[in-house]
Image (cartoon, rainbow, N blue to C red):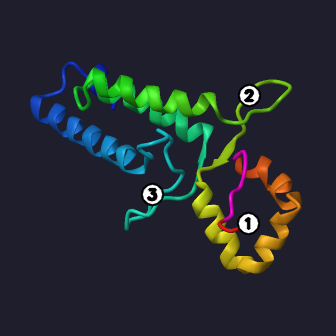
């Protein structure tokens, strides 16, 4: 994407080709970024499936790519600000190392429903319900998945 800014002597055809590459690259970032959290997935499969994890590297690459896309006219300034607002808003609430404030290298982007469905499938509903009855399992999992409280239907 940045080649467009450092190649003023490139032909119009070459600039168009580079701009096309930049647009398709941005399309991939758009496809892999969660619209509600503003966080990019680590992996985007060819069928459109996204991984459930992200990293600080993924987030950094997404943010500088968003700036480049805005500078190239692929996204508007207003869209850039909206995207950054979502991403930074999410980052503000993410768990970090307590002693340094640094972000962890990897995060899971699972919502409570996905977690409960996965645990329920793996453990069976009754086992899961008993495991949460004394809140021991919840206390053990809370730091891993970063949610405040599990709510089981009928529990």
Q: Quadrant of the N terminus?
A: top left
Which residue is painted at 72% across and 36% down in the image? 95
Front position in the image: 81 or 6: 81
Q: Are marks 3 and 1 in contact (CB under 8 Å)?
A: no
* Secondary structure, magenta segment, majority class: loop
Magenta stretch holds residue 66: no
Residue carrying label 2 = 102
Residue farthest toward the front in the current orientation of the protein: 154
* Image quadrant assignment for residue 105: top right
* Image quadrant assignment for residue 129: bottom right
Residue carrying label 1 = 155
Q: Nearer the observer, disc 2 or disc 1? A: 1
Front position in the image: 125 or 38: 125
Residue 145 percent coordinates (x, y): 71, 51
Residue 35 percent coordinates (x, y): 41, 43
Kindly state the secondary structure of the residue where label 1 is placed: loop
Work out whether residue 8 can be spotted: yes
Residue carrying label 3 = 44
Q: Nearer the observer, disc 3 or disc 1? A: 1
Q: CA separation, marks 2 and 1?
A: 36 Å
Residue segment shown in magenta: 147-152
Which residue is painted at 68% across and 58% down in the image? 151
């Amino acid at each position: 994407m940045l080649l467009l800014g450092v190649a003023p002597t490139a032909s119009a055809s070459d600039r168009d080709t580079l701009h096309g590459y930049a647009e398709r690259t941005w399309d991939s970032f758009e496809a892999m970024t969660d619209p509600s959290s503003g966080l990019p997935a680590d992996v985007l499969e060819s069928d459109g499936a996204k991984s459930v994890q992200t990293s600080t590297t993924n987030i950094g690459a997404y943010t500088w790519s968003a700036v480049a896309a805005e500078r190239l006219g692929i996204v508007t300034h207003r869209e850039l600000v909206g995207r950054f607002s979502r991403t930074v808003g999410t980052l503000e609430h993410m768990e970090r190392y307590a002693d340094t404030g640094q972000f962890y290298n990897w995060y899971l982007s699972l919502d409570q429903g996905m977690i409960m469905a996965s645990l329920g499938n793996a453990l069976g509903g009754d086992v899961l319900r008993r495991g949460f009855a004394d809140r021991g399992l919840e206390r053990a999992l809370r730091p891993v998945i970063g949610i405040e409280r599990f709510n089981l239907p009928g529990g």
